[in-house]
Image (tube, rainbow, N blue to C red):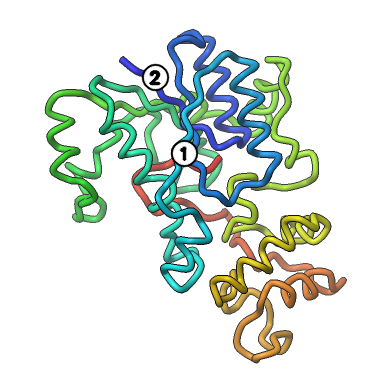
C-alpha cells in the first residue's frame, strides 16, 4: 500500500503532510507535486525544503506541455469556466502516476469544508476514481478509461481528507506546532500560492504581484508569447482597456494601482471550486 500526499506547497497540503507523518511515518509517505512550470520560485524552494526536513520522498510530475506551452497550443489562457490547466497539468499527470503503480494507494488531499459550500458537501473519504464509475452529472470520466477500470479491478485508490473539518487557524497551528513555517508567499500577503499568478487570483494578490518585478515581467512576457490576455474580459471596466474590449496585464496592473480600484473582480464571494471530481491539487 503506497501513501500519496498531493502537495502543492500551500498551507493545507503542508498540514496534510505533517499529519500523515504522525499517522503513517515519513518512510511510508510519498509527496506528489505537479509542476505546472508556472509556480513562484519561493514555492519550489518551500516544497523542496519541507519534504527534506520531514524526510519524505518527493515525486515531481511534469506534464508534456507546461502552463505557457499549453496556453500557446490552446491559443488562449485558462479561465474559470475553461480550466484546462487543472485537467492537463495536474489531474492527468496524477492519474498517469497512479496507473504506473502496481499496488493499491491511499491519496491524501488537503480539502477543507470551510473553503466553500460545494466542498462542505463532499465527504472526508471516498474512492479516487469514483467519477469513472458514478460519473459527474451523469457523465463518466473518459481519460484513459479502459486502463483505469482495469487498474481498479486489481487495486484500490482511496481518498482521505484528514483536515476536512479544520479551519484555517487549525491548519496554521498544525504547521507552527511542527516547528515549520508555511510558504513564504503567505507572509507577503498572498491568499493563493498555487500557480503564480493563478487565473483565479484575488485583486489583493494582483496588487502584491505589482511589487514582484520577476513575476510581473513573466506574466507580461507570457501574454506576448501566447498572443492573448491572461485576464477575463470583464476583469476591469472596458473604458480602461486600450482596445475597448479586454485588458492586457500592464493595463490591469495600472488599474489595480488606482486608489479607486477597491472591489475584488478576480474572485466572487465564497470563492471558486474546482469543477473536477479530483480535488486538493492546488492548496
Counting residues from the N terminus, which is met first, the one under dot 1 or under dot 2? 2
Residue found at x 58% / y 59%: 200
Image disc number at residue 260: none
Above or below, 211 relative to 248: above
How crowded is the residue under tag 2: few (<14 C-alpha within 10 Å), some, or many (20+)? many
The number of discs equals 2
Residue found at x 45% / y 43%: 62
Closer to us: 67 or 244 = 67
The CA distance from mark 1 to mark 2 is: 15 Å
Closer to us: 194 or 73 = 73
Q: Which residue is mark 2?
A: 3
Q: Position of residue 224 (x, y in %)?
A: 62, 74
Q: Quadrant of residue 255?
A: bottom right
Q: Which residue is mark 1?
A: 280
Q: Is residue 86 left or right of residue 9?
A: left
How crowded is the residue under tag 1: few (<14 C-alpha within 10 Å), some, or many (20+)? some
Return the residue found at the far right. 259
> Element type at marker 2?
strand
Q: Position of residue 218 (x, y in %)?
A: 68, 60
Q: Quadrant of residue 205?
A: bottom right
Q: Position of residue 170 (x, y in %)?
A: 65, 26
Above or below, 64 relative to 262: above
Q: Position of residue 234 (x, y in %)?
A: 60, 78
> Element type at marker 1?
loop
Q: Is residue 258 left or right of residue 10?
A: right
Amino acid at each position: 500500500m503506497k501513501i500519496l500526499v498531493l502537495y502543492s506547497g500551500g498551507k493545507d497540503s503542508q498540514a496534510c503532510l505533517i499529519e500523515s507523518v504522525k499517522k503513517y511515518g515519513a518512510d511510508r509517505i510519498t509527496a506528489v507535486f505537479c509542476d505546472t512550470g508556472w509556480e513562484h520560485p519561493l514555492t519550489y524552494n518551500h516544497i523542496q525544503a519541507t519534504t527534506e526536513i520531514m524526510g519524505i520522498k518527493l515525486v515531481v510530475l511534469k506534464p508534456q506541455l507546461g502552463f505557457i506551452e499549453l496556453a500557446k497550443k490552446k491559443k488562449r489562457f485558462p479561465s474559470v469556466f475553461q480550466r484546462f490547466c487543472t485537467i492537463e497539468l495536474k489531474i492527468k499527470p496524477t492519474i498517469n502516476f497512479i496507473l504506473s503503480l502496481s499496488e493499491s494507494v491511499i491519496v491524501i488531499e488537503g480539502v477543507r469544508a470551510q473553503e466553500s459550500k460545494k466542498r462542505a458537501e463532499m465527504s472526508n473519504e471516498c474512492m479516487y476514481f469514483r467519477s469513472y464509475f458514478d460519473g459527474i452529472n451523469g457523465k463518466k470520466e473518459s481519460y484513459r478509461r479502459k486502463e483505469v477500470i482495469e487498474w481498479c479491478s486489481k487495486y484500490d485508490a482511496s481518498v482521505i481528507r484528514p483536515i476536512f473539518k479544520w479551519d484555517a487557524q487549525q491548519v496554521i497551528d498544525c504547521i507552527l506546532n511542527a516547528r515549520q513555517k508555511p510558504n513564504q508567499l503567505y507572509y507577503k500577503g498572498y491568499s493563493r500560492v498555487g500557480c503564480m499568478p493563478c487565473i483565479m487570483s484575488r485583486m489583493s494578490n494582483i496588487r502584491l504581484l505589482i511589487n514582484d518585478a520577476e513575476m510581473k515581467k513573466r506574466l507580461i512576457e507570457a501574454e506576448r508569447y501566447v498572443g492573448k490576455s491572461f485576464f477575463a474580459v470583464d476583469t476591469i471596466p472596458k473604458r480602461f482597456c486600450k482596445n475597448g474590449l479586454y485588458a492586457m496585464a500592464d493595463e490591469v496592473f495600472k488599474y489595480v494601482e488606482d486608489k479607486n480600484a477597491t472591489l475584488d473582480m478576480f474572485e466572487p464571494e465564497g470563492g471558486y471550486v474546482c469543477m473536477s471530481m479530483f480535488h486538493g491539487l492546488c492548496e
